[in-house]
Image (cartoon, rainbow, N blue to C red):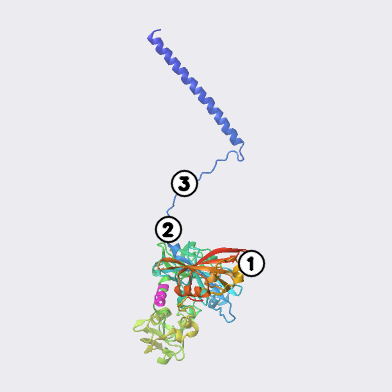
Amino acid sequence: MSFVDRIRTQKLLSFTLMLFTLSIGIVLGTLIGSGVKAAKDNSQAPGATPLVIPNPVELSNAFTQIAKQVEPSVVNISVTYNARPSRARASQRRPVNPDDGDNGGVDDFFRRFINPFGGDGPEMQNNQGKALGSGVVVDAAGYILTNNHVVDKADRLQVKFPGDANQYDAKVVGTDPATDLAVIRVEGKQNLTPVKIGNSDAVQVGDWAMAIGSPFGFDATVTAGIISAKERTMNDDNSMQFQHFLQTDAAINPGNSGGPLLNMRGEVIGINTAIASHTGGYQGIGFALPINTAAAVYNEIIKNGKVTRGSIGVTFIPSDEPRAQAALKASGTNDGVFIIEATPGGPAEKAGLQKGDIIVGVNGKTIHVGDDLLNVVTTTPVGNTLNITVLRDGKRDNYKIVVGNMAQIFPDQFGGGEQNEQAKPEGASVSFGMTIVPLTDRQRENMDLKEKGGVRVAEVEPNSFADDLHLAAGDVILSIGYVVKGTPVTQPVSSVEDVKRVQALLKPGDSVKLHILHRDNPRSGTWVSDYRAGVVPNSAR
């Protein structure tokens, strides 16, 4: 065979091999395709395509970042009221109902707002009232800003932090009913994260806003909306004249009270205080006290334990009311504050001011409306003298008036902050809140205690440290663990005196662990060994 013939033969063989391989591929593809089609045809959803979950991707979202930043600073406040026949409930005000007369009865503005369980005032069970609110950590030393109506007349306050199952007792540092603000302090909690404080004067209507709190007891709930309005006031209630609210449509519900309203920089611009609602729940109208007001109140409270405001002892009506407009026009002016009463015995009455006078200036500065007068007088230290310019019968005259204490001049409206029932001094020693007695030999024998030791719990006080640890009458305490200068110590308990000695060594905020014996159920004869740990409360109870 020639060389050319061999080349032709090899090409023919190669072409034949390629053709054979291609034919085999086509046959296999047909078989596989038929098999797949058959499988689809036999499935429960013919023609359906499985869903594919994409890889997780973190989206850029300002609300997400703010929530992560601020949530550790927002706390849940649990409030307990012990039932007393004489307990006044007037301070637990309900939400505004637009169907009510007189602007929904704003004299009873906050009732039900702090009660996530519904009804008027706290939920009562077993002669105790329970309510929930929110608060925001403003200082790493444990200081928390909240609403006065959250803590008012409470017998016990407990604070719960996000991601921490423990509840920490808190005490009230001071309150200001006029702005419905309160400062409380919790001890025994480490590494607190305070919020960033913003400037509420910079807030614009239409700005984004975000609220965080514990509505209906659901911790760390985040809602968002916008600033709907500024400078909202309740003009028919003199006790609320220091409350000029930011209005928002961020969802605010019972339990949000005392929590922060935030801007898009994660800064607090307000303290959520109230809602306007037909139902007591969210209807798109919430109110927050501007943080500039709240910060001024907070600074006064941590300095003096209360807020002292100056007053000259006059009552006035808004300048845009017809009666005030008529009086201003008759006196030939468009600006000024129309006085409807000079409090008998008050600074203004002593200086010679009368009903019907129009205040047009203070210390040479023109007074246009009532807020101008309030801003000057209330921030003037008590005892200082103001030069008040008055229009009477078309004539101007000046009066020197010594500023008095608003809480003393108007005790019914503003006297609540002078004596704070909740601001109790810390106890020098701690109490576990239980009565203990020695064990008898017969009791030791029944529990199979071979060594002499242990004391029996005879009684547990409600809402006490022992109650927090779920101790019950009949339990036996075998030992108490605590820490001294960083060193854990376990004290065996053989007598009542052993417990008292440990109590004398402890201070509020210390951690304690009790080794106890208890029955697994009341009817069982089996005794179970258990450990109960907690933080010593801030004051003896």
- The crowd level at tag 2 (other Cα within 10 Å; few <14, some 14-19, many 20+) is few
Give the distance between the C-alpha atoms of the residues marked 2 and 3, in whole angstroms: 21 Å
Q: Position of residue 186 (x, y in %)?
A: 45, 71
Q: Amino acid at mark 1?
A: Pro
Q: Amino acid at mark 2?
A: Gln
Q: Nearer the viewer, residue 303 or 332?
A: 303
Q: Which residue is mark 1?
A: 522
Quadrant housing residue 361: bottom left
The residue sitting at 53% across, 68% down in the picture is 478
Quadrant housing residue 338: bottom left
Q: Which mark is residue 55?
A: 3
For marks 2 and 3, the one nearer the N-term is 3
| SS for callout 2 | helix
The residue sitting at 43% across, 91% down in the picture is 349
Q: Nearer the viewer, residue 411 or 68?
A: 68
Q: Is residue 298 magenta?
A: yes
Q: Is residue 174 left or right of residue 92?
A: left
Q: Which residue is mark 2?
A: 65
Q: Amino acid at mark 3?
A: Asn
Give the distance between the C-alpha atoms of the residues marked 2 and 1, in whole angstroms: 50 Å
Q: Which mark is residue 270?
A: none
Q: Is residue 223 above or below residue 146?
A: above
Q: Looking at the image, can residue 379 be seen? A: yes
Magenta segment? 294-302
Which residue is farthest left? 364
